């Protein structure tokens, strides 16, 4: 069972179904965010449907780009054989 899951997420031939699954999950999260009651929201942006999803996605993308920048441009990343 675990082998099928690992193959699904690691094998290139499952790229299209994997991408469709991720898009479906993203749509379900956005739809679920519309169903959340918002009468006790503290800030204005908390009342916007889809804000949490957009904020989380944007934050993850920003973390990835900042990490890539720090690793490649600033020099924090080392070669694979650095300690050899």
Image (spheres, rainbow, N blue to C red):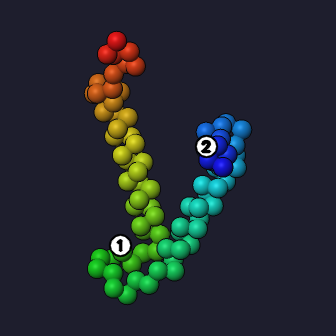
Image position, residue 2 (x, y; %): 62, 47
The answer to whether residue 71 is above or below residue 84 is below
x%, y% of residue 53?
46, 64
2 or 1: mark nearer the eye: 2
Please say if 38 is above or below 57.
Answer: below
The alpha-carbon separation of the residues under discs 2 and 1 comes to 38 Å
Looking at the image, which residue is at 58% across and 68% down? 28
The answer to whether 38 appears left or right of 26 in the picture is left
State whether residue 9 is above or below residue 78: below
**Quarter of the rendering occupied by the C terminus:** top left
The picture quadrant where one finds residue 81 is top left
Q: Is residue 47 visible?
A: yes
Q: Is residue 73 visible?
A: no
Picture quadrant of residue 80: top left
Q: Residue furthest bottom?
A: 39
Q: Which mark is residue 6?
A: 2
Label 1 SS: helix
Q: Position of residue 73 (x, y in %)?
A: 32, 27
The residue to which callout 1 is attached is 45
């Amino acid at each position: 069972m675990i082998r099928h899951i690992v193959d699904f997420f690691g094998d290139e031939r499952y790229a299209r179904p994997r991408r469709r699954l991720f898009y479906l999950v993203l749509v379900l999260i956005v739809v679920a965010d519309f169903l959340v009651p918002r009468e006790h929201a503290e800030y204005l942006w908390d009342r916007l449907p889809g804000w949490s999803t957009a904020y989380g996605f944007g934050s993850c993308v920003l973390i990835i780009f900042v990490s890539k920048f720090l690793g490649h441009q600033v020099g924090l990343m080392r070669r694979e054989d650095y300690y050899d």
